[in-house]
Image (cartoon, grey):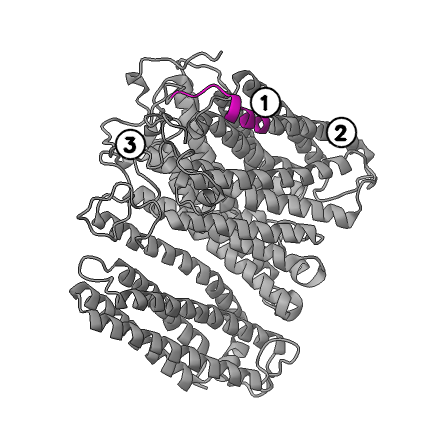
Amino acid sequence: MHNSPIATADQEAHQNPALLHHFATEEQQKDAASLGMWVFLATEIMFFGGMFCAYLVYRYWYFGDFGAGSQSLNVVLGGTNTAVLICSSLTVALAVRAAQLGQQKVIIICLILTMLLGLVFLGIKGVEYHDKFVEHHVPGPGFHFPGHVPGHPDIPINQHHAQIFFSLYFIMTGLHALHMIIGVGLFAFITYNAMRRRYGPDYYTPVEVAGLYWHFVDIIWIYLFPLLYLIDRSK
Amino acid sequence: MASGERETYLNKEYGIKSWLLTVDHKRIALLYLVSITFFFFIGGFFALLIRLELLTPAGDLVQADTYNKLFTMHGQVMVFFFLIPAVPAVLGNFLIPIMIGAKDLAFPRVNLLSWYLYIIGGALMLYTILNGGVDTGWTFYTPLSTEFLNTHVVTAGLAIFVAGFSSILTGLNFVVTTHRMRAPGMTWSRLPLFVWAHYATSIIQLLGTPVLAITLLLVVCERLFHLGIFNPALGGDPLLFQHLFWFYSHPAVYIMILPGMGIVSEIVCCFSRKRIFGYTAMALALLGIAVVGFLVWAHHMFVAGISLYAAMIFSLLSYFVAVPSAIKVFNWTSTMYKGSITYQTPMLYAFGFIGLFTMGGLTGLFLASLGIDVHVTDTYFVVAHFHYIMVGGMVMAYLGGMHFWWPKISGRMYPEGWGRLAALLVFVGFNLTFFPQFILGYMGMPRRYWDYSHSPEFQILNVLSTAGATVLAVGYVLPMIYFLWSMRYGKPAPDNPWNAAGLEWMVPSPPPTFNFEEQPVVTWEAYNYDEIKEEVPVAQ
């Protein structure tokens, strides 16, 4: 953060090297960074909100087909992934705490654990995508989803409506996975800095702010999981 | 830098690298200025071709397909690459940190990133244009855009998607900067209305733009992978697309106009030598427009098949926008009442803004009422209405602001006589272009038609409109010429050429890289013109 080309002009010798030139105090800088992340997350809510809106409309219209689509998803893998992500949120929170306490090794361990859990999530997601591909459940010319609406043996599944379910499934989980990949990249960068002992009680804003982002990505999944996997499991 | 010369943000470093890698908000503002001016003239070029085609009733200059592309690219370039970024990214970027007494925006490198995103989006748009363009209309309505066209919808959609994130990052920077970077004593009630206006604008950018982004992404996916999310033939809902699109694109109108209102508030106070009338009401009206503006989007869909009850509610809510808008117009007028008014170029543009915005706003009420809207939907009445807001309002304010702060930005005075002439040309040309379109629309001429040979009685008004567009073009080219001229030959500008209030006039023209030598402490209210004894200097 502190290699800004114009940061040298009026820095006093004794102050925190992480303090950028245009902030008066470290507190102001920290407040700005964390407010910036919160505001960014508000835009992310609106970004995903558009898709949730589309989901709600079509789920209301095509409930039976959405239920059938949902039942074809692997709830064991999805549930495992939910647990994996919740654990990764814990390790991020521990990393922030370790940074505040200046426990250099613990920061690095927690960050690496977070990245590993993130990669496990992405791996499991990849397996699920592969299964869907093999089953011809990917929307497009090869789409094939036989069967009937859950609880109604006489109503066959409408192929168009089921495709809408799977379109939304792939776009929503795909964009979520993209956010996970960005998050893992972010943590790789922060781990590198942590190895250079950049963070401590005086300066841990990047860890905290990236942690906020990661929690947000987790929360999106907390909503995606029941909405996509658990629509109509009772029948 | 020549020896003995004062160091400014302009002469501190030279070379292409010192510009392309700068994190100085003032230099980034100039990068934006050059880029948006480029796109303004591209969009204007399309507009002139449209007006040329409509000079005669027959479709003789271009054919239907080309004409569809012309108005589509005119709309997309002007809306997403000029109107939305123009005031915030140029004047807002340059002035907000100085106005609140900060050295820079909160996130200087994010600011540079937003310019690069704009450039990437702009490059994609240029690629689209050069490869034959796109003809969806700027609104990308489905399933036309996803199913029935063979033009470059995907790249145009991605261009706007990327440019949208540029807009989001600018808004994010402004919100955090306004909250966290204000100088000691610069309380919320002392902020210039220009800053309030950008704060309100940023809220819309932050909450609206992501919805447009995801909507366009869905359109792109639908086209690439033949999904059916918005395609009625595949069970999708085109109305859902329209709801999502207008959820952003109606508030986007306020992204364009609110910063303009901020500019006009600054100019009116300065050239009337008076404190703004009703400061608190003016600030709240800005926020009010931003909030109510989010609740009116479906008035673009009155004939699209939404339920009558929804239409009635949206009609009523659309009327509510008139309340804060009227507060603004009345308060500018009250500010001028018994003021010591002088008629410099920025003030001429401000007068133009107030009048034209009022006309655009009042015709907006016609369109918000269900009965009249059905009659004039998709006619030139609508075209004239929104051009009165966007061109008559926003572009007027932008040019007014450019003249007002040009001495601060460049350190040079523009030629006042030419400035007044250009302002007059823009005003006359604008009205000549767009007033006939109200009548055309009311008479029933539909928008987006390249050929009106079935009703040649429309020709005389179309000829007037095209003539006006020519005058308007001259009015727009003139400032570009004399601004460039003044950078070399203009009279050196004093620090405060208008004897105006505000922190930006207390720093040198042009400002040094860090804006302030020392941290300023604010002990006065905004627009304290009662404490400034000097008048606006009379132009030579």
- Which residue: 68% across, 41% down? B46
Badge 3 is on which residue? B190
Q: Mark 1 highlights which residue?
A: B422
Crowding at dot 1, Cα within 10 Å, few <14 / some 14-19 / many 20+, comes out as many
Mark 2 vs 1: CB contact within 8 A: no
Q: Which mark is residue B382?
A: none
| Disc 2 target residue | B463
Q: Quadrant of the N terminus of chain A?
A: bottom left
Distance of label 2 from label 1 (alpha carbons): 22 Å
Residue A204 visible in the snapshot: yes
Where is residue B384? Give x, y as percent: 63, 35
Residue B533 in the image, given as x and y percentages of width and height: 31, 13
Q: Name the subunit of mark 3.
A: B
Q: Is residue B34 above or below residue B141?
A: above
Residue nearest the viewer, comparing B29 with B141:
B29
> Residue B358 versus residue B351: which sits nearer the camera?
B351
> Is B481 one of the magenta-colored residues?
yes
SS state under label 1: helix
The magenta segment is B479-494
Q: Nearer the viewer, residue A178 or A101?
A: A101
- State how far apart marks 1 and 3 are (Cα): 34 Å
Residue B139 at what x, y percent from top left?
A: 61, 51
Amino acid identity at mark 1: Ala
| Residue type, label 2 | Val
Query: Going by the image, does A172 lie left or right of B501?
Result: right
Is residue B305 visible in the rendered image? The answer is no
Q: Main secondary structure of the magenta part?
A: helix
